[in-house]
């Protein structure tokens, strides 16, 4: 298996622009997680899905952030409009079942100028 | 709210040493605890997962212990090698009554450097 796939790996954009991050979980995994990592706050869970349904989005910082999972093999995290403080590394992870080992993608490094 | 603390924040040791990384958490109502490794510019790799009913898990030169009542876990690395250099993250899985909430709360990590 190729593991969790994220795209793009790097994104540089200007303040106010829309940003869309993409994730393909490991085939057969029924849980998908979006995390954000910064030096100041470490790794934070933003939202997670079970069988394509959002279960907990309490970590989503603002209404500017939205996430979707239209099918079992694809999820997006969108930021609109983007701000410099959104600059971070965004990770997607998936797991086979609740409470089991999470497998992380390589991350997307987002820079908002 | 669960808080996870890792000590030390950074550690530098010569090759061959045995070392211990510490993780503490404030709420003992956990489902499991995971240790991850993160290399610079890369994602996280799961090392060990300990269920709340277990006391320890071993994989090769790694041994992780869990003391739920005291809110502590340790990761023991035997005979350290330069290739072990990375950031080690502890993550607590929340849950109660044998049910996982599905969420992980991470510590800030320990940056380990093993020099030849």
Image (tube, coloured by chain):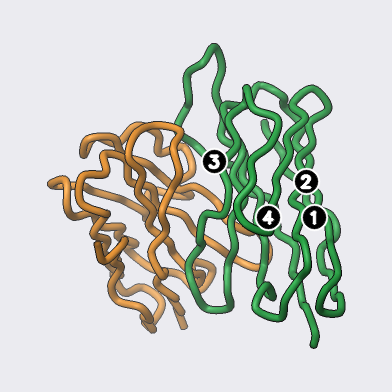
Chain colours: A orange, B green
Q: Label 2 vs label 4: CA separation? A: 10 Å
Q: Nearer the viewer, mark 2 or mark 4?
A: 4
Co-location on one chain, circles 1 and 3 = yes
Query: Answer yes or no: do the residues labelled 2 and 1 have beta carbons within 8 Å?
Result: yes
Co-location on one chain, circles 2 and 4 = yes
> Residue under circle 2?
B74
Which numbered marker is on residue B21? 1
> Residue under circle 3?
B104
SS class, disc 3: strand
Residue pushed farthest bottom? B116
Q: Residue at x 40, y 34 (%)?
A: A56
Q: Nearer the viewer, mark 1 or mark 3?
A: 1
SS class, disc 2: strand
Q: Nearer the viewer, residue A14 or B82?
A: B82
> Residue under circle 4?
B62
Q: Residues within 10 Å of mark 4 (few under 14, many from 20)?
A: some
Q: Residue at x 62, y 22 (%)?
A: B53
Of all chains, the one bearing label 1 is B
Q: Quadrant of residue A99?
A: top left
Sequence-wise first label, 1 or 4: 1
Sequence-wise first label, 2 or 1: 1
Sequence-wise first label, 2 or 4: 4
Q: Label 1 vs label 4: CA separation? A: 11 Å
């Amino acid at each position: 298996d190729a593991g969790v796939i994220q795209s793009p790996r790097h994104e540089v954009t200007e303040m106010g622009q829309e940003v869309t991050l993409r994730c393909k979980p490991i085939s057969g995994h029924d849980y998908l997680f979006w995390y954000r990592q910064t030096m100041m706050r470490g790794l934070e869970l933003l939202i997670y899905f079970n069988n394509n349904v959002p279960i907990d989005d309490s970590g989503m910082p603002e209404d500017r952030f939205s996430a979707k999972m239209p099918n079992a093999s694809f999820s997006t995290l969108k930021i609109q409009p983007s701000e410099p403080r959104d600059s971070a590394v965004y990770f997607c992870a998936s797991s086979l079942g609740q409470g089991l080992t999470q497998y992380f993608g390589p991350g997307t490094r987002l820079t908002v100028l | 709210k669960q808080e996870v603390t890792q000590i030390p924040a950074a550690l530098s040791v010569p090759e061959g040493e045995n070392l211990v990384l510490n993780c503490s958490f404030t709420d003992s109502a956990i489902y499991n605890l995971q240790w991850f490794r993160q290399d610079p510019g890369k994602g996280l790799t799961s090392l060990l997962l300990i269920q709340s009913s277990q006391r320890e898990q071993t994989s090769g030169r790694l041994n992780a212990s869990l003391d739920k009542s005291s809110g502590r876990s340790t990761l023991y690395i035997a005979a350290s090698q330069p290739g072990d250099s990375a950031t080690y993250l502890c993550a607590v899985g929340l849950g109660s009554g044998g049910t996982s909430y599905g969420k992980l709360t991470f510590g800030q990590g320990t940056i380990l450097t093993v020099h030849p």
